Amino acid sequence: MRIVMAVRSEGSTSAVEELRGWLLNEPELRGRVRREPAEAPPGAMGPAADALVALLEPGGVAAVFAGAVVAWVQTRRGNHTVTVTRADGSSVTISTRQARGLSPQELAELAERLARSSDPAEPSGDGRNQADQPGEDPVP
């Protein structure tokens, strides 16, 4: 399954590359993550931001992917937001602001939710964003 990750960051132009490097440090994810230009919304002027694409298969790879994304977000300074979108359009958004306030148990639950949404063997539900509302941080 193809997963697209969009990274928004305040004050860092290298956040996409930092996340890519972090993910590629996981042996199970090597060769599965690449950088590519994101599609610009219709009518947008200028180039779109880069995105990361991960190719995942059913099983433990989704759990490794989810744990790595949550750990990366949790360890960042500044404000970063990662939106993980499945091919069917369903998505999960994780932000540093959200992750800083979570207990270890809540972080584990967030990683589990992201793993379920990233696992090709799991149904995606209704295709809506699994975060609360656009512009808000999701609550585990």
Image (cartoon, helix red, strand yellow):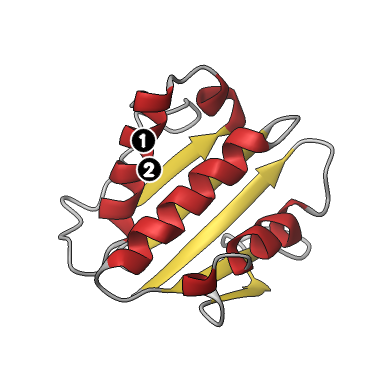
Q: Is residue 135 above or below residue 33?
A: above
At x 59% / y 40%, what residue is drawn? 73
Question: Residue 64, located in which quarter of the rendered image?
Answer: bottom left
The amino acid on which the numbered mark 2 sits, given as a three-letter code, is Ala
Residue named by callout 1: 108
Q: Secondary structure at mark 2?
A: helix
- The quadrant where residue 139 appears: top left
Q: Is residue 62 above or below residue 33?
A: above
The label shown at residue 111 is 2
Q: Most extreme residue toward the front, as rendered?
A: 27
Mark 1 and mark 2 residues within 8 Å of each other at the beta carbon: yes
Q: Residues within 10 Å of mark 2 (few under 14, many from 20)?
A: many
Horizontally, residue 128 falls left or right of residue 106, namely: left
Q: Nearer the viewer, residue 16 or 62?
A: 62
Where in the figure is residue 60, as x and y percent of width and height? 30, 65
User: Percent x, y for residue 140?
Assistant: 33, 27
In the rendered structure, which amino acid carries the disc numbered 1? Ala
The picture quadrant where one finds residue 81 is top right
Query: Residue at (57%, 62%) from the top-left corner?
Result: 42
Q: Going 50% across and 29% down the picture, which residue do you hit?
A: 135
Q: Classify 10 Å Cα crowding around label 1: few (below 14), some (14-19), many (20 and above).
A: some
